[in-house]
Image (tube, rainbow, N blue to C red):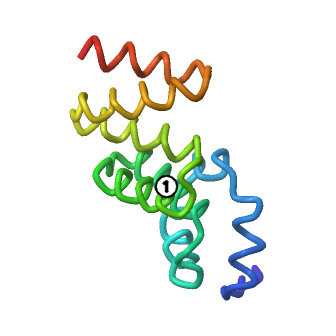
Amino acid sequence: MAVATTGPATAQRFFQSFSDTLINKDPQAALQELTKALEQKPDDAQYYCQRAYCHMLLGNYCDGVADAKSSLKLNPNNFTAMLRKGICEYNEKNYAAALEIFIGQKLDSAHANFIVWIKRCQEA
């Protein structure tokens, strides 16, 4: 078995193709790799967004909110980070905060996911 080298160039190549599908396979390993990548490149909004997804899958919703916020600070128009932040807020039972996120984004987007989550928040 070949030993993978880890460094900024390797991490960058790895994460260029690091999709939600790959995160779904092993969110804990992905979380560790994304953390390493953020040590090398702490201003990458996509790394924070993907790490927020890892936290969501692992049930670490508070950490997911923090990473989604970091992603949005770097890229305020990141639709996926906004959705992930809202979902994490919802799972933390911060329904009002989640609803605010989803309604605010709904105004700018007709994306069905926001409508579904708005209904969930209103029901909760």
- The residue shown at (33%, 33%) is 98
Crowding around mark 1 (Cα neighbors within 10 Å: few <14, some 14 to 19, many 20+) is many
Q: Determine which residue is flagged by label 1.
A: 72
Residue 84 coordinates in the image, percent (x, y): 46, 42
- Using the image, determine if residue 102 lies above or below residue 23: above
User: Is residue 80 toward the left or the right of residue 13 in the image?
Assistant: left
Residue 85 appears in which quarter of the rendering? Answer: top left
- Using the image, determine if residue 8 lies above or below residue 115: below
User: Is residue 42 toward the left or the right of residue 95 in the image?
Assistant: right
- The residue shown at (34%, 30%) is 100
Q: In the depicted view, which residue is nearer to us: 84 or 10?
A: 84
Residue 48 coordinates in the image, percent (x, y): 51, 62
- Using the image, determine if residue 96 lies above or below residue 57: above
Identify the amino acid type marked 1: Leu
Residue 119 coordinates in the image, percent (x, y): 38, 13
Residue 19 coordinates in the image, percent (x, y): 69, 51
Q: Farthest residue toward the front?
A: 107
Residue 110 appears in which quarter of the rendering? Answer: top right
- The residue shown at (61%, 60%) is 46
User: Is residue 38 toward the left or the right of residue 118 in the image?
Assistant: right
